Each structure stands twice: as structure tokens, then as C-alpha cells.
Image: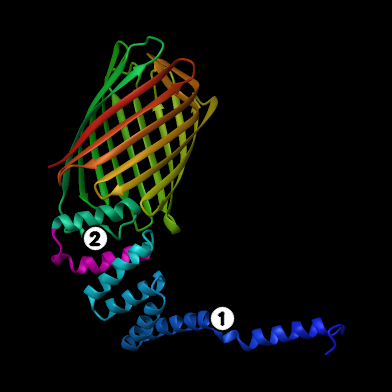
Amino acid sequence: MNLRSPYLIPALLIGALLCAYAGRGFTAEPVDDATARFRNAQDLRESGELDAALAEISTLRSEFPRNVDYALARAQILVALEQDQEALAELAAATKLAPDYEAVWRLRFAVLTRNAHTLSESERESLQRLAAARYPHADWWQALTEIDRTRWTVLVGGGYDDLSNDLPSWNNQFVALQVRPNQRSFHELQVTRDQRFSDGDLGVRIGTDHTLSEDWFVGGDVATVSNPAFSPELAFSAHVGRALPAGWTADIRYRQRNYATDDVATFTATAEKYFGDFRTAYGLSTSRLNSTSTTIGHSVSGNWYYSENTSFGLTLSFGEEAEAVGANQVLETDVSGLAISGRHRLTGRLELQWWAGMHEQGDIYRRRYLGVAFSIRI
């Protein structure tokens, strides 16, 4: 062929396309073939041909060791064959491949629950804490420790606030009795003492939370004080939330605070996302003071679940706030704040909690605070 022929380039292009078509079995076909084989294994499992399904998925699993869906599918077949120990080994491997894959965790806990007699209480609690850190509003992990008994806990703690502008410091102490009659319900009775400037408030708070289903949860609390100098005479809140796909959770809360001279109503919408050993959340709050003016506040937070016994948190807040800044004085101010916190399980029954931060209350004062609490299971 003449190298200067006008047909040279079209001929070369057509030849390249024919070669690509002829060689398509070496590129696209393995991917399509694997997909078809995976679908076939699923069909075999659903039709009850478990041995054939296991052979097919085991081959895929060895060919694609990083594919977590193949690991999960193989574990499902092993569970159906009642080969629980091999299934648990496969699920443990799948958890390492995708630490936040909820379907893997759910199946793993289902198998562990029916083999709970092989685990010690500490092993069950350790696994439950790991799952609860990632999926706090799910109920599939609760069955493992719903070898049901009521759990009682005493929480004792206090805090100290240092104020700028030569203002006297604040302090507070609290003790709470917490009861979890089962893994779906939580109740708390708390007694608090707050000292601000020359005034002190002694208060009582009752709270409760319930998991209604795998997706929905609700809760609420009510509090009152004996000497409402700067705390509301009556405060109550209620919230409802839902666990969403891909580790997302949404929650809406209403809070009402009735002071001696003012009322504040607040709506807060929160969206949070769990992934691996981390959690992030954003909250948007709108408050109305005496049903007239409206303020808007924001919060951004994150948590790192370093291990089953240790976690850390960071929260940023900014916007506007309607808050008691002195005796019988509720004001709207611009606010900003930064807080860090931590939780550390010291023993099977003792846990340490701590928090510290800074809060800017407009031009009135800046608070630098810290606090510590111990949780003791009885």
C-alpha cells in the first residue's frame, strides 16, 4: 500500500478496532465473567444448592481476595451450611477489608449470638462496644449481650469554669443513677449542683432513651431546680432519630427552657456519619427568645474510637445563642467555642470521662472550663 495513500489512516484504524474486538476476551470478559459467576453462586444459594454455591464463590474468593462482597457471600453460604467457625473466620477477614460494612457486622453478630456459649462475658462486651461505637442506634448487636440482665451504673463528676474580665469562677457537681433494663432502653436520674457568681442552683433531671426498631429511636428528659437563679425553672426536651444507609444517622430535637423571666424554645437538627473508627456530625439549631427574636447556631464535631476502651472527641460551635449570663438575665449573644473530650475504660466496671474547652459569650466573658467524671457499674 502506498504510504501516502488517503486510505492508509482509515485502514490502520479499522485494523486496530478489529484487533481490539478479537482480543476482547483478554480484557473485559474476565470482569463480566466474574460478575456472572457471582450471580450464579447467589442463585445457587437461593435455590438451596449450597455445595455448588460454595464451590463457585470459593473460587471467586481466591481469585479476588480483596473483594469484600465475595467474602460476605461465602460467609452467608457457610452459615447456611452451619459451618459457623469457618464463617466467623471469613467475616473477620471481611471486617478487615471493610471496617464499616454494616452487613458484615450484622451477620457476624448473628453467628456469634447463636454461639454465645463459646464466648466469655468480657469477649461479648468487647465485641459489643466495637459494634456500638460504629452503629450506636442499631439493635442487631444488642442480642449478643441480651443474655438479659438489668445494668445499673453510678456516674459521679464535676467541673470548673474560669471566667475572664475578673469575674468569679463557676463550679458544678453531679451524681447520676443510670439503669439499662435491656439493650433497647436507657433511663437516668441525675442530681446537680451549680454555683455561678454568688448564686447556687440545686436541680434534678430525669431522662430516657429507647430504640424502637432497627432504624428508629426516641428519647426525652425533664429537669427542674429548687432555686432558679440562672437555671430554668423547668426544662424539657424530646427527640426522634433514624439510622440511615451507609452509616448516616439523622436526629431532630425540641428543647424548651422556662426561666423566671424568659422562655427559650430550640429546635436542633443533627446529621452524623460513622465510618470505620470515626464519626462526624453537624448540628443546626434555631432558638426563639420569648417567641420574638430568633438565633441560629452551628456545631461541628468528630470522634475517634481509638480502641474498644478509648475514644476522643472534638467539637466546634459558633453562631448565636440565647442563654442565661447572670441571675435572671437571659441574653442573645454571638458565641464561639472549642471543646475536647475523652472516654477511657479503666476496668470492666470503671470508666473515666473528661472534657475541657473554651466558650466565648459575646463581649461579656470568655469561659475556660474542664471537668471529669467516673462511671461505676454496680
Residue drawn at x 43%, y 45% is 280
Residue 74 at x, y percent in the picture: 34, 77
Q: Which kind of residue does numbered mark 2 sit on?
A: Ala
Residue nearest the viewer, comparing 255 with 3: 3
Q: Give the range drawn in magenta.
A: 103-120
> Is 264 colored magenta in this rendering?
no
Q: In this view, does 4 lie above or below 374?
A: below
- Residue 231 appears in view: yes
Which mark, residue 143?
2
Q: In this view, does 277 lie above or below 157?
A: below
Q: Is residue 354 above or below residue 146?
A: above
Q: Mark 1 points at which residue?
A: 27
- Residue 136 appears in view: no
In the picture, measured across the screen, residue 347 lies left or right of residue 67, that is left
Residue drawn at x 27%, y 31% is 205
Instruction: Say what secondary structure mark 2 lies in.
Output: helix
Q: In this view, does 331 lie above or below 37?
A: above
In the picture, measured across the screen, residue 43 lies left or right of residue 92, that is right
Residue 76 at x, y percent in the picture: 32, 75
Residue 19 at x, y percent in the picture: 66, 86
Q: How far apart are marks 1 and 2 (CA)?
A: 46 Å
Residue nearest the viewer, comparing 93 with 273: 93
* Neighbour tally class for label 1: few under 14, some 14-19, many 20 plus, Cα within 10 Å: few
